[in-house]
Amino acid sequence: MSSADVDAWFASYDNPMKPVVAEMRKIIMNADSRIGECIKWQAPTFTYKGNMASFFPKSKKHASLMFHKGATIEGDFPNLEGDGKEARSFKVKGLDDLATKSTELQAICVAWCDQQDER
């Protein structure tokens, strides 16, 4: 279920990547009914039993979604990038790139929710 706060954020979001970010939001929210959304850190954040991922809204060359504890998500997700202790980024260059990565994005979201239920 979408959030009125996130709808309002998108209404005022002025960025060339807005169509990509909006489509990523749809994919995430449709990936699993357990996922919620809110505004945290001045950006849309997706949640399920904790913070799952947040957009980096200032990125203009690609849409960037940070999975706060992406390193802990079990599975083979080649587009989760980074080598930090916990965080991983999922970057998309445009709508065509998103079309090739959407199945993986959905799988990451479901894996997060499933892991949270196992804990």
Image: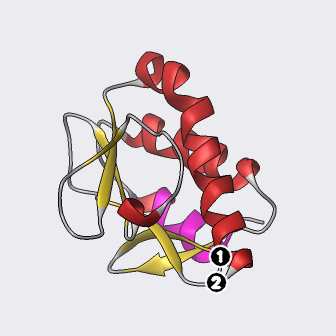
Q: CA distance from mark 2 to mark 1?
A: 6 Å
Which one is nearer the viewer's eye here, 24 or 71? 71
Looking at the image, residue 114 sits to the left or right of residue 11; the answer is right
Q: Characterize the magenta stretch by its predominant secondary structure.
A: helix
Helix, strand or loop at label 2? It is loop
The quarter holding residue 88 reads: bottom left
Looking at the image, residue 16 sits to the left or right of residue 53; the answer is left
Q: How many marks?
A: 2
Q: Nearer the viewer, mark 2 or mark 1?
A: 1
Instruction: Examine the structure image and report whether residue 102 is included in the region drawn in magenta.
Output: no
**Residue drawn at 55 percent across, 83 percent down:** 50
Neighbours of disc 2 within 10 Å: few (<14), some (14-19), many (20+) = some
Magenta range is: 3-10
Q: Which mark is residue 44?
A: none
Q: Amino acid at mark 1?
A: Gln
Residue 116: x percent and y percent?
65, 76
Which one is nearer the viewer's eye here, 15 or 43? 43
Looking at the image, residue 74 sits to the left or right of residue 64; the answer is right
Residue 26: x percent and y percent?
65, 46
Quadrant into which the N terminus falls: bottom right
* Residue at the disc numbered 2: 49
Q: Amino acid at mark 2?
A: Lys
User: Marks 1 and 2: in contact by CB < 8 Å?
Assistant: yes
**Residue drawn at 18 percent across, 63 percent down:** 84
Q: Is residue 103 above or below residue 111?
A: above
Looking at the image, residue 5 sits to the left or right of residue 32; the answer is left
Query: Counting residues from the N terminus, which is met first, the one under dot 2 or under dot 1?
Result: 2
Which one is nearer the viewer's eye here, 16 or 23? 23
Quadrant into which the C terminus falls: bottom right
Helix, strand or loop at label 1? It is helix
* Residue at the disc numbered 1: 116
